[in-house]
C-alpha cells in the first residue's frame, strides 16, 4: 500500500515537473472559458462582419448553444491533447528502462499499472471538472434558464468515463507495445474500431463512442437516459477489462 | 546456504543461443566475479536472475526461493545496479532515493538518514542538481546508492566500474570490500584487476558457457605453472648462472631470456631449495627469485581461446 | 463598446491566462537555453506571438532535457 502511494506521488511529481499538469490545466481552463464565449459571441461577430444592409436570421443564442460548444470542444480538442499525454504513461517508462530499478526492488508490477491509472485518472478528472465548472458558471451568468440537471449530469459523466477508458487503453497499449507511439496507435485503433462497428445499428447503440457523440441528443431530450446507459455500461466494462489485461500483459513482459 | 543457485540455464534470442546450459552456485557472503567479454551473456544472466527475462530452460533459486519470470518475490532480497542505470531525469538524487525507500517499505525516519549516508558514500552528497544533468559516472554512483538502499542480502552489479574514472573505481571497489561479509556480491566485469582485488570466487563466461568456476586462490593454485624465475642484473651473470652445475642437477627445464632465467619443473619447492643452496656459493646474486603465479589475464585468455 | 463590456467577465480571465502562460514559457525559454529544436530567438517569438498553442508546443515538444 505504501509502495502504491509512493508511486502515485511520483506520477504527480512527474506530471508537474514535465509540465503536463500545466498543459492540461491551461487547455481545459481555456476550453471552459471559450465554450460560453463562442456561443454568446458568434451571432454578434457574424452581424458585425456582415456588409451593411444585409441581415441574417440567427436565433438568439441559448443555453444549449453553450453546452453544444462544450460537448464539441472537449471531445475534439481536450480529449485529443489528453490522449497524446496519456500515450507516454507506460510506454515511455518501459522503452527507457526507468522502471528497472524500482521493479528489481520488489515493486509489484500490478502496483505500477494501478497507480498510474489512479494518478492519471485523478488528473483527468480534475482537468475535466475544471473545464465543466467554468463553463457551468459562465453559462449560468449569461443565460437565465439552464439545462436539465439530471440530463446534464448524464451527458457530462459520459465524456468523463470515456476519458478513463482512454487511460486504460493507453496502459494496455503501453504494456503491449512498450512505446509511446504503440500506445497512441492502440488508442486510435480502439476508437476507429468503435466507429466501424458503430455502422451496424445494433452494435452501434453499445459503442462507448456514443458517450462523446450523443451528448447533445441526450441534453435536448431526443434520447432517453436509458439509451445513454448502454455505451456507459460498455465503457465501464471495457475499462475494467483493459486494466486487467494490462496488468496481466505487463506481469509477463520481458524488460 | 547458497545465495544463488543456477541449474541448466538456457536462453535463446530467436535462433541465437546466448546462454547454453549454465550451472553454478554462489555461497553466502562472498564476492563473486562474473567475468566475460562483451556479449558473453553476463547481462542476460543477471536479467534472468531478476525475473526480467524469461529463461528457456533451467532454474534459478535465490536464497532457496525459486525465481519466477515477471513478478518475482525474490527481488526483495536483491539490490541491482544495471550496466547503464536509468533514472527519472526530473528528480534530484535525494528525491530518487526517497522514492526507492518508500517502495521497499523503509521506515521514513531512518530513510532520510540512510539516503544521506549513501549519498556521502558514493560522493554525491553535495550534488543537488536534477539527475537529467548527470554524467554517466555520476549516474553509476547514484545507481550504486539505490542498489544498496534496501540493505540487500544479494547485490548484483553489472559492470559497476566501467563508466568510472580511476578515483571513482577505487571508491566503488573499496565499498565492495567493505560490505564483503555482510552482503553477497555478484559483479560482472571485464576488468581483471578489479576481480583480483576483491573477488573470492570467479566464474568465466564465454559464448554462453562456463569455462572456469571456483574460488580464486584454488583456481590459481591449480593452474600454477611450476615456474621459477631468477632475474639477474646483466645478461652475462644470467648466462653464468645458467651454466652452473647445481642448476643443471635440479633436472628442471632451463630457459634463458636475456637477464631472466626460467626453470620449469614438477616440483618447484625442491628446485627452489637447490638453487638457493647453490647461490650461496656464488658471487653474482640475482636481483630476484620468484615463483611465477599464473596471471588472471593468462588464465582468461587460455580458457577463452 | 457595450458589447465588449458584456464579454469582459470571460475575456479578462482568458487574457490573464494567456499572458501568464506566455510569461511562464518566456521565462523558461530564457533560463533553460537547451531546446530539442529551434533556438532561443525562435522560441521567444513563438511563445509570445502564438497564443496558447505556442507555449504548449514549447512545453510539450521544444523544451530541452532537464538540467
Image (cartoon, coloured by chain):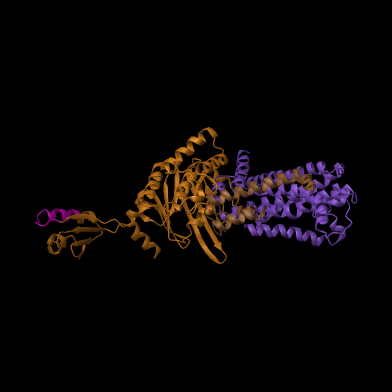
Chain colours: A purple, B orange, C brown
Q: Left or right of B94: which side holds A219?
A: right
Question: Looking at the rendering, in which quadrant would you find the C terminus of chain B?
Answer: bottom left
Q: Which of the 4 quarters of the picture holds residue B292? A: bottom left
Please state the extent of the stretch shown in magenta in the rendering.
B272-285
Q: Nearer the viewer, residue A20 or A154?
A: A20
Q: Nearer the viewer, residue C40 or A232?
A: C40
Q: Residue furthest front?
A: A52
> Is residue A44 on the magenta stretch?
no
Q: Nearer the viewer, residue B18 or B92?
A: B92
Q: Residue furthest bottom?
A: B15
Up the image or down, C10 lies above or below A97; here it is above
Instruction: Look at 51% across and 36% down and name the residue there.
Output: B111
Q: Position of residue A27 (x, y in %)?
A: 69, 50
Question: Is residue A141 among the parts visible in the rendering?
Answer: yes
Q: Left or right of A90: which side holds B124?
A: left
Q: Position of residue B258 (x, y in %)?
A: 19, 65
Question: Is residue B182 among the parts visible in the rendering?
Answer: no
Q: Nearer the viewer, residue A117 or B263?
A: A117
Instruction: Look at 32% across and 53% down and name the residue there.
Output: B221
Instruction: Look at 20% across and 56% down and name the residue there.
Output: B271
Amino acid at each position: 500500500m505504501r509502495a502504491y502511494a509512493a508511486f502515485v506521488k511520483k506520477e504527480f511529481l512527474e506530471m508537474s515537473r514535465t509540465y503536463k499538469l500545466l498543459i492540461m490545466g491551461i487547455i481545459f481552463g481555456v476550453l471552459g472559458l471559450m465554450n460560453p464565449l463562442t456561443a454568446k459571441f458568434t451571432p454578434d461577430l457574424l452581424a458585425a462582419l456582415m456588409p451593411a444592409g444585409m441581415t441574417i436570421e440567427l436565433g438568439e443564442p441559448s443555453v444549449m448553444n453553450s453546452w453544444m460548444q462544450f460537448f464539441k470542444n472537449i471531445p475534439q480538442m481536450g480529449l485529443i491533447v489528453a490522449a497524446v499525454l496519456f500515450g507516454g504513461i507506460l510506454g515511455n517508462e518501459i522503452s527507457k528502462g526507468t522502471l528497472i530499478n524500482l521493479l528489481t526492488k520488489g515493486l509489484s508490477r500490478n502496483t505500477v499499472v494501478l497507480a498510474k491509472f489512479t494518478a492519471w485518472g485523478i488528473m483527468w478528472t480534475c482537468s475535466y471538472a475544471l473545464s465543466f465548472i467554468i463553463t457551468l458558471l459562465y453559462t449560468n451568468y449569461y443565460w437565465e434558464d439552464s439545462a436539465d440537471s439530471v440530463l446534464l449530469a448524464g451527458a457530462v459523466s459520459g465524456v468523463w468515463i470515456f476519458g478513463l477508458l482512454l487511460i486504460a487503453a493507453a496502459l494496455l497499449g503501453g504494456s503491449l507495445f512498450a512505446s509511446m507511439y504503440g500506445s497512441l496507435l492502440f488508442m486510435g485503433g480502439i476508437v476507429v474500431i468503435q466507429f466501424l462497428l458503430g455502422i451496424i445499428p445494433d452494435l452501434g447503440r453499445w459503442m462507448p463512442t456514443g458517450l462523446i457523440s450523443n451528448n447533445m441528443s441526450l441534453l435536448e431530450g431526443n434520447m432517453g437516459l436509458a439509451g445513454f446507459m448502454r455505451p456507459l455500461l460498455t465503457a465501464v466494462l471495457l475499462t475494467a477489462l483493459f486494466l486487467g489485461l494490462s496488468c496481466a500483459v505487463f506481469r509477463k513482459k520481458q524488460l | 546456504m547458497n545465495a544463488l543457485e543456477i541449474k541448466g540455464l538456457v536462453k535463446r534470442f530467436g535462433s541465437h543461443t546466448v546462454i547454453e546450459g549454465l550451472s553454478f552456485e554462489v555461497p553466502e557472503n562472498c564476492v563473486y566475479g562474473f567475468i566475460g567479454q562483451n556479449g558473453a551473456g553476463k547481462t542476460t544472466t543477471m536479467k534472468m536472475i531478476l525475473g526480467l527475462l524469461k529463461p528457456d530452460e533451467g532454474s534459478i533459486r535465490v536464497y532457496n526461493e525459486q525465481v519466477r519470470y515477471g513478478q518475482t518475490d525474490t527481488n526483495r532480497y536483491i539490490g541491482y545496479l544495471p550496466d547503464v542505470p536509468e533514472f527519472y531525469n526530473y528528480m534530484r538524487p535525494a528525491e530518487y532515493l526517497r522514492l526507492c525507500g518508500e517502495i521497499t517499505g523503509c521506515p521514513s525516519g531512518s530513510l532520510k538518514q540512510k539516503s544521506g549516508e549513501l549519498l556521502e558514500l558514493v560522493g554525491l552528497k553535495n550534488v543537488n542538481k536534477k539527475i537529467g544533468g548527470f554524467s554517466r559516472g555520476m549516474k553509476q554512483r547514484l545507481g550504486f546508492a539505490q542498489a544498496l538502499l534496501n540493505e540487500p542480502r544479494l547485490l548484483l552489479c553489472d559492470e559497476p566500474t566501467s563508466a568510472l574514472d580511476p578515483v571513482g573505481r577505487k571508491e566503488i571497489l573499496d565499498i565492495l570490500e567493505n560490505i564483503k561479509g555482510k552482503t553477497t556480491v555478484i559483479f560482472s566485469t571485464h576488468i581483471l584487476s578489479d576481480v583480483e582485488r576483491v573477488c573470492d570466487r570467479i566464474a568465466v563466461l564465454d559464448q554462453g558457457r562456463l569455462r572456469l568456476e571456483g574460488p580464486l586462490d584454488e583456481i590459481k593454485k591449480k593452474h600454477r605453472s611450476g615456474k621459477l624465475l631468477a632475474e639477474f642484473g646483466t645478461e652475462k651473470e644470467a648466462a653464468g648462472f645458467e651454466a652452473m652445475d647445481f642448476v643443471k642437477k635440479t633436472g628442471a627445464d632451463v630457459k634463458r631470456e636475456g637477464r631472466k632465467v626460467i626453470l620449469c619443473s614438477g616440483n618447484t619447492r625442491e628446485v627452489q631449495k637447490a638453487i638457493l643452496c647453490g647461490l650461496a656459493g656464488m658471487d653474482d646474486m640475482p636481483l630476484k627469485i620468484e615463483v611465477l603465479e599464473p596471471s588472471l589475464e593468462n588464465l582468461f585468455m587460455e580458457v577463452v581461446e | 463598446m457595450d458589447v465588449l463590456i458584456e464579454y469582459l467577465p470571460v475575456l479578462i480571465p482568458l487574457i490573464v491566462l494567456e499572458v501568464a502562460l506566455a510569461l511562464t514559457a518566456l521565462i523558461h525559454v530564457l533560463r533553460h537555453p537547451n531546446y530539442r529544436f529551434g533556438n532561443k530567438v525562435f522560441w521567444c517569438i513563438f511563445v509570445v506571438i502564438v497564443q496558447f498553442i505556442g507555449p504548449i508546443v514549447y512545453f510539450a515538444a521544444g523544451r530541452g532535457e532537464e538540467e
